[in-house]
Image (cartoon, rainbow, N blue to C red):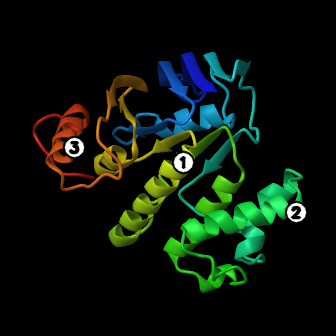
Amino acid sequence: MSLELIGVNKTFSDTKQATINDINLKIEKGEFICCVGKSGCGKSTLLNLIAGLLKPTSGQIILDGQPVTGPGPDRIVMFQEHALFPWLNVIDNVTFGMELASVPKEEQMARAEKYLKMMGLESYHHYAIHQLSGGMKQRVALARAFTMDSKVLLMDEPFSALDKQTSNRLRKELQQIWMETHQTIFFITHSVEEAIYLGDRVVVMAEGGTIQNVISVDLDRPRHVYDEKFIDYRRHLLDQIQGEETHADR
């Protein structure tokens, strides 16, 4: 499996200014790709193009040799908000997508229990969504996303609305799940620390919707934010995004 963007451009008719400009990128099966850049550089637009929620003005997006022409079950999207159904309990939320995809009931339960256990939620099957904390809701959403067994999982700043302690815990849990599954992931974030912690490669986007650089992260997993080499990567990536005038993470 590979996902390839070839000369992708996106211009919105109301602005007539390119939001995404000549993007060329290839993502191989099992890669964890993080995408960072200043606000307004087109990160979320790029994710929506890959998801098929937007169509490029020009260029092609190819998944497994087939052009992406719209949304599909081979590309699952997880946004900042958990988007859980409040009238369904935890287990029914996790199995909802699989039910729509006609996955056999026995397989639905096996997958749901597997990922709920990975997220530490094996004893919360029958809890109502309103009984969960914000972090627990995102863990349910993560479990639901992984159960779909899609070719690509697209994640748009899924931890940005959470407090620091909760987001750090979820990063750790996501890294552990990825190490076990090697799910192909394209992950948007504002945090350089998060990008280095999670990514095999980090795509640095610049104003004008271009790719400024793609940085390979050569760090053993599991990763630790206080390792000297991790700190070096963080400093280098911040310099790429912000220039050398500041090293404050956002």
Residue 70 image offset from top left, x and y in percent = 75, 32
Q: Earlier in the sequence, mark 3 or mark 2?
A: 2
**Label 1 SS:** strand
Mark 3 crowdedness (10 Å alpha carbons): few <14, some 14-19, many ≥20: many
First of labels 1, 2 by sequence position: 2
Report the amino acid beneath label 1. Met
Give the left or right position of residue 145, taking residue 179 as reference: right
- Residue under label 2: 105
Tell me the element at label 3: helix
In the picture of the structure, the residue carrying the numbered disc 1 is: 155
The residue located at (66%, 21%) in the rendering is 62
Position of residue 2 measured from the top left corner of the image (x, y, whole percent): 60, 25
The answer to whether residue 61 of the structure is visible from this angle is yes
Residue 17 in sight here: no
Judging from the image, what secondary structure is the residue with disc 2 in? helix
Q: Position of residue 111 (x, y in %)?
A: 72, 60
Q: Are marks 1 and 2 in contact (CB under 8 Å)?
A: no
**Residue drawn at (61%, 32%), measured in percent from left and top?**
50
Mark nearer the N terminus (1 vs 3): 1
Amino acid carrying label 2: it is Lys
54 with respect to 202 (left or right):
right
Q: Who's the residue at 40% across and 71% down the image?
A: 166
> Which residue is depicted at the point 77% across and 75% down?
88
Which amino acid does the dot numbered 3 rest on?
A: Arg
| Quarter of the rendering containing residue 241 | top left
Coordinates of residue 179 in the picture (x, y in percent): 48, 49
- Taking depth in this image into account, of 104 and 193 the one nearest to the observer is 104
Disc 1 versus disc 2: distance between alpha carbons? 27 Å
Gap in angstroms between the C-alphas marked 1 and 3: 21 Å
Residue 234: numbered disc: 3
- In the image, is residue 9 above or below residue 198? above
